Amino acid sequence: MGNAIMSVVAFFPSKSCQKYLLGGDIEELPPDKMMDLSGKELRQFPLQVCAFTELIKLYLSNNNLRTLPPEFHLLSCLQILALDFNRFKELPRAVCRLRQLSILYLDNNNLSDLPAELSSVTDLKTLWIENNCFEQIPKVICELKQLKILHAGSNRLEMLPKELRRLGELQSIWISGNLFCEFPEVLLEMNSLEIIDVDRNGIRFFPSLVHMKNLKLVIYDHNPCKNAPDVTEEVRKVGRWAEYRSESNNKLLPEKKTEQIGENKQIEVTEKDECNKDSGQKVLD
């Protein structure tokens, strides 16, 4: 009986506990229904947070978390969840029970796969899995039919699955810093794409992208390619390419080229590190 009482009490934080968790004298759920516990050096998720069942945004970035408690699923109203810069080797199953989730940040962990149960998060629109240990795109991602934005850069990807074409709503895919030697053919079939980022790969030839009517931006810098991708005039290209030259050492020599962006601005290297966590989209300088 005593344990049962203690477990109930745990879900109703005292004022002192709230002050510890939230960094202020907060006696009720914040008006914006947002809680930021980033950079708190947490090794365990504070179970008391599960009392705030109306939370919409929860930021747990830059901690030392490896697991989440089963009670985490009580935060059923969450729409934005940031678990980036932690130590997860597996995605906690409790996250897969958050049916309202729209944006999920999992970048900079130690993940190599995602559970099939993630397909239950049917409203997921933005997924970040950058800087993990993925050698292939998890199958479950191809089942997220509402997905619009996928960040999968800085992994160990060599190809994209044909099943990715099922994502008829996908608007942007960021796969820079992987091991692609060829431009992923499946992307040529995805006419919903507006942004393609294949920066920092090993792509040697780009097929024509002229037929992709919704395309707005292609980032192809730092590839040993012999050509720039063909696109319509409305599409912005960011990158430069290399050409094979008949030299005695037969090495690949880069030819420096710049893209004219606007009236006076030229871009050779694109910066993509800034992001808006409420939208889930990266911000380009």
Image: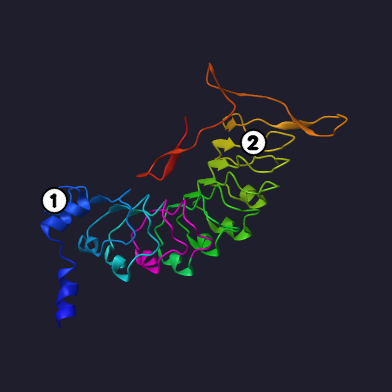
Q: Number of numbered discs present?
A: 2
Dot 1 amino acid type = Ile
Q: Is residue 90 magenta?
A: yes
Is 4 drawn above or below residue 122 in the view shown?
below
Residue range of the region highlighted in magenta in the rendering: 85-114
Q: Residues within 10 Å of mark 1 (few under 14, many from 20)?
A: some
- At 49% from the left and 37% from the top, the residue drawn is 272
Is 247 drawn above or below residue 133 in the view shown?
above
Extreme residue in the bottom direction: 1
Residue 244 occupies quadrant: top right
Q: Which residue is mark 1?
A: 26
Asked whether 139 or 244 is in front, the reply is 244
Location of the N terminus by quadrant is bottom left
Which label number is shown at residue 222?
A: 2
Asked whether 78 or 250 is in front, the reply is 250
Can the viewer see residue 135?
A: yes
| Residue 184 x/y as whole percent | 65, 49
| Residue 58 x/y as whole percent | 30, 53
Asked whether 153 or 193 is in front, the reply is 153
Can the viewer see residue 29?
A: no
Q: Is residue 87 magenta?
A: yes
Dot 2 amino acid type = His
- Tell me which secondary structure the magenta stretch mostly adopts: loop
Which badge, 2 or 1, is on the more N-terminal residue? Answer: 1
- At 32% from the left and 62% from the top, the residue drawn is 44
| Residue 148 x/y as whole percent | 47, 50
Q: Secondary structure at mark 1?
A: loop
Please indicate whether residue 150 sits to the left or right of residue 68 in the image. Answer: right
- At 21% from the left and 54% from the top, the residue drawn is 21
Whole-number angstrom distance, CA of label 2 to CA of label 1 = 49 Å
